[in-house]
């Protein structure tokens, strides 16, 4: 379903070329100061158009407050934010309807929703919906303050030097992927549950809701599979649980252990590449060559950090509420 | 919480050195033939003692049917299976209570549950609970028949040759990790939801409930972050969605696309290594050196395949039910 | 939380005197034809102003489609409907803030949300939110077609003759309550679950989300407690489960039995009565007399039937989906 | 499904004539002292055989602790209790399989579970499962201490004098119903949510999971529908929310208001009456007369009070946890 969280429950809705996208946050504590300005930094970080490698589509991306805010503070009732879609050019997409784009959800959406899906620009599957996640993340991060959730790109197109990685894509007239790493410090010991609601389970669940994510690893991650146990184990050094090393990435037995939470995700190269590609034409049943038109990103990973921070913060607020560390009214 | 799934809801309970571990499956379709023998292959695959690299603890691991089966078939009411713990030696653990073992949940469990946790052998955090997952998986895999869920170890201790990898650990008197890969073929197009209940989200959620998992990647995974888009995209070749390549691992836009589902997980080296290690003594507040006694695995990854199949099958049954491809009575 | 349903999940938001109220329906099947006109009959039935006994507040109550509809049909993505609040007169309420109105949520909302609640006109607790329920009900009833959900008032102010009951209230310069009965025919046998998700449990859960409901009874209801078993039992007469009598109201063991579903609810008299009343003044800590100003209903029960149909239909769609009788695409 | 609660999640399983019935409580706080003796009073109150009007079936009804208790206290891990079924006489039921008993779930269970249901003694639909509810209630009531949940029978067979009511049934050689009232005092202000998770919604949901309940009313209940608003409104008298009257039964706007919680439920007469009845024979398709044999209650309402207390306490613990008034470790 299109909602995530038990206590801090985020529901997203909307389509890329519909009238709007939006988000309802049910369970937001009362008393949190909230203004439009709070959102502009993160929606800007996420937005295309100001950076080499991102789509020229320009949206204002200012939230309209529809419910849940009164006199500049949250009320405890559901908080609804709407973002209007103004700068859409659906004509770009309609002519391609019979040609499902490789790497996109066109084919599966058509099968799943019986042809009734809004296919324009990916419809409800569009990356535009991540704007709703970012908005929820702004609220979540405010609630978590002074705790800090920080995501950074560590690699683009296989290069730690990001400019170089982007240039590789430009030179090849192709799209490139990247790696994004997230850090959270200041977490209490004891968040998470054994087994099904481990912190890794909940974060991974949320993270794979970001389009284009292909993998996630915590702490030392895949490299841990090649280490000896005595090297991988983090020796506990203090009564608060501080460990000498942090191979575990801040989670043991599914529970936060008081160290920095660290994980990394892999972002695939943008599916809409300028290169010519082959796909099936549903109407003719034949293979055909096509090039994706419309406005697209050279590297979608560039826009991921605020989205990754958002879903991480959503998970953490929910966990802090479950553990009764955050109440129904902000202090 | 200790349950997973909406339609096919699996709840696990028990402790390593308590009286028993068990599982309740709520939502199991009626009419499925089920006998104790159905469980023995997978509980055997998971069990220690028959293979180089696994713990000598020997349990019979035969399920006791407590509810939900009548005349050899499931009834549609909750199915409860109990496994008795017979071969426990708690004395091994009690003397170490003041020394939280590195890499284990001892420290976080103590903090989270205020010292009331059953600390013997990891208590409820123990890998013994994966027996319950395996049991649920046996039922789930039966329901999915003829669809096949298959997990295999592809790497131990950094070596594709598994014997060699284990020998590395033995030679070093240390423990080693591994990589396990899972394949499912025959899935219909259209399972999963956009965003929060993407197939990757649900599988990752379930997979990180297996102790010792440090990462997961779908299809080409982390390597995708280093590919060009035109290389990564899978060209659609047939009206059923078959693609020429399968970099996506069978999932696009969070939805199954009719190709083989493929993903890999990283398993850390067993935390209980024979090597001496340093940790904190809670009572003295001092660092101290200790060696884990008790019975333990050289490489826990060896026991993971049936557990991985189990949680994967649980997710798939739940998704198939959500999409109304499996009903309340087996055909 | 402000959502109901597992598969057909309805989330409501908004405040009486905020900018808008609205609803997100997650899980609506794709392909359902839907237009603004579909909503006007039920929003009209619920609306005040056209009938003796209801508030003169006039709102247009036309839904704005914000997501989930494309080319006149639902897409399978979340369906969002917004209703603007235009005809608000908040001044009526603000002067009374320090005087919590008896029978209203003013006091509890203030305590629960730390004084940050939107108190104007009851804020999020307002009966205006039932407009969102009615809107969700329109969609649910369309999905259930040709099955019919029908609610009727059977008693007002203690009188089966409704005009007479209203007149009693008018004569007394007071407000009155009523009884509303709901019938659903054509339900299949087998909806519902034993124990916690019995049909009665789910319907009662939904029904008590309607403000002012004080009781619910199924079939013969409270009168059953005074019958002999042999009189109360409904003799089964056909292989489809038709019974001679219907004391059970169409549900046995928590499961629909193929007979008409029948239940009744009690609606308290409108809390905002024109009569002078005594309450506490928070600021002074003293009792004080006051009369509710603002626009209010003589008998809120008059507006309940479409709301009752709505929540009943929501429950039934959810159950039909759970039992896989309704799929993700309408036929 | 067979589970209830978000934080304090109770799952029940088992069949009347299977090996056992049981309950898993997931989310029980750690540190609660718990012994077998804690259960005996309530399982006794619920048990048949010691009182005029209840079935002579005798079970010991002592819980076996299967998980979640260590050194006499809960551990925070799932708590599992098992009750063995010893005193079953299935032969009583098997001969009647083709004759679905009126008022029982035989017919609907058969339809729903395709004939695979355990039909002996009502199988999973049996009132024996309420033993699991009572057990969960014992735990919930301990957690709520010193707050007190108290249910009492107020009417049997239409008579406030209970002996007289039972005698009516005995004289008529028939079964009778009753009314049970529940009181909870000491609740804080602010439990519950507006709309869908109102306290009434949650309690009603839980209460209708008790077999034989036909109606519920809060405070003045159905009688409120015949009152004037000015009579029904409860004047607030203190800063803590104490009201002069308590027509609301302690809940306003779905939220507890600091007054006594009061509600009543109607229990139908036992379906298994000694009287001859008519029903359908599935095999012959003909009506036939039969008399229920086996051991049964003259008045099932007699056994309801501890069950009603149990489900009420379950709801309240869950709500208190949601509002962070109860944590993961008991004080």
Image (cartoon, coloured by chain):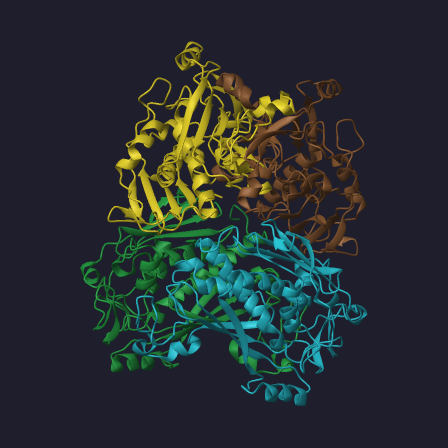
Chain colours: A yellow, B brown, C green, D cyan
- Residue D109, compared with residue B278, is above or below; it is below
Which one is nearer the viewer's eye here, D189 or D5?
A: D189
Using the rendered image of the protein, determine whether residue B74 is visible from the camera's viewpoint.
Answer: no
Which one is nearer the viewer's eye here, C58 or A133?
A: A133
Residue occupying the point 73% across, 57% down: D116
Left or right: residue C194 versus residue C269 is right
State the image coordinates of residue D136 (x, y, percent, origin top left): 60, 61
Residue occupying the point 42% across, 59% down: D192
State the image coordinates of residue C186 (x, y, percent, origin top left): 55, 64
- Residue C208, compared with residue A160, is above or below; it is below
Left or right: residue D135 versus residue C141 is right
Left or right: residue B145 versus residue A89 is right
Which one is nearer the viewer's eye here, A223 or D220?
A: A223
State the image coordinates of residue D262 (x, y, percent, origin top left): 45, 72
Residue occupying the point 61% across, 87% down: D163
Which one is nearer the viewer's eye here, D264 or D151?
A: D151
Using the rendered image of the protein, determine whether residue C191 is visible from the camera's viewpoint.
Answer: yes
State the image coordinates of residue B252 (x, y, percent, origin top left): 53, 30
């Amino acid at each position: 379903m299109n909602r995530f969280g038990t206590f801090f429950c985020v529901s997203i809705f909307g389509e890329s070329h519909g009238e709007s996208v939006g988000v309802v946050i049910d369970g937001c504590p009362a008393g949190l100061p909230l203004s439009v300005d709070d959102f502009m930094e993160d929606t800007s970080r996420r937005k295309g158009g100001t950076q080499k490698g991102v789509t020229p589509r320009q949206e204002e991306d200012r939230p309209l407050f529809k419910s849940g805010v009164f006199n500049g503070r949250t009320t405890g009732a559901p908080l609804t934010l709407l973002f209007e879609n103004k700068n859409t050019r659906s004509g770009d997409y309609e002519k391609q309807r019979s040609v499902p784009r490789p790497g996109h959800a066109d084919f599966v959406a058509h099968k799943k929703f019986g042809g009734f899906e809004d296919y324009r620009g990916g419809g409800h599957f569009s990356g535009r919906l991540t704007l709703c996640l970012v908005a929820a993340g702004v609220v979540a991060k405010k609630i978590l303050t002074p705790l800090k959730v920080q995501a950074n790109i560590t690699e683009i197109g296989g290069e730690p030097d990001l400019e170089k990685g982007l240039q590789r894509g430009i030179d090849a007239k192709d799209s490139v992927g990247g790696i994004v790493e997230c850090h959270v410090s200041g977490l209490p010991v004891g968040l998470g549950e054994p087994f099904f609601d481990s912190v890794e389970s909940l974060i991974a669940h949320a993270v794979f809701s970001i389009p284009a994510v292909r993998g996630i690893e915590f702490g030392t991650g895949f490299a841990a599979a090649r280490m000896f146990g005595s090297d991988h184990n983090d020796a506990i050094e203090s009564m608060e649980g501080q460990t000498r090393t942090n191979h575990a990435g801040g989670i043991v037995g599914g529970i936060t252990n008081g160290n920095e939470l660290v994980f990394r995700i892999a972002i695939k190269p943008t599916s809409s590449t300028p290169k010519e590609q082959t796909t099936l034409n549903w109407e003719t049943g034949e293979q055909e060559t096509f090039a994706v038109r419309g406005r697209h990103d050279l590297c979608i990973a560039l826009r991921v950090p605020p989205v990754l921070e958002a879903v991480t913060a959503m998970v953490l607020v929910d966990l802090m509420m479950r553990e009764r560390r955050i109440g129904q009214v902000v202090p």
